[in-house]
Amino acid sequence: MANHQSAKKRIRQIEKRRVHNRYFAKTARNAVKELRGTSEKESAQELLPKVTSMLDKLAKKNIIHKNKAANMKSKLTIFVNKL
């Protein structure tokens, strides 16, 4: 257990950041799942820029790795083009 005031504060900050990051990561995962479940090309083309933007923001904030974001965007783009 932390004894110093700075260590206690750091624990509070880390927990708050963890919850914040989990929320945005889960939201993005749900958006990706929704896009993959779409079978209509027009609705998929409307969702793709929004999902791409979400992934870019997560990568920028280091919530997910930039290469993972790039891979997901690539695979989603291929999926939408095949529809």
Image (cartoon, rainbow, N blue to C red):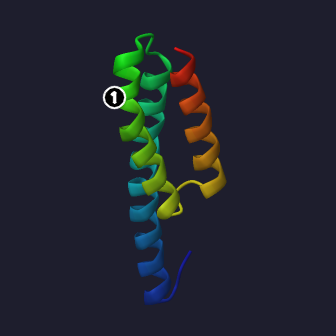
Q: Is residue 51 above or below residue 5?
A: above
Circle 1 SS class: helix
Nearer the observer, 28 or 66: 66
**Residue 43 spot, x, y in % from top left:** 34, 20
**Residue at left 48%, top 47%?**
55
Number of marks: 1
The image quadrant where one finds the N terminus is bottom right
The residue carrying pointer 1 sits among few (fewer than 14), some (14 to 19) or many (20 or more) residues within 10 Å by Cα, namely few
**Residue at left 48%, top 31%?**
32
- Residue at numbered disc 1: 46
Q: Residue furthest front?
A: 81
Q: Residue furthest top?
A: 39
**Residue 70 spot, x, y in % from top left:** 60, 48
Nearer the observer, 4 or 53: 53
Picture quadrant of residue 65: bottom right
**Residue at left 60%, top 38%?**
74
The amino acid pointed to by label 1 is Glu
**Residue 83 spot, x, y in % from top left:** 52, 14
Q: Is residue 18 above or below residue 8?
A: above
Nearer the observer, 68 or 27: 68
**Residue 12 spot, x, y in % from top left:** 41, 71
Q: Is residue 6 above or below residue 42?
A: below
**Residue at left 45%, top 49%?**
22
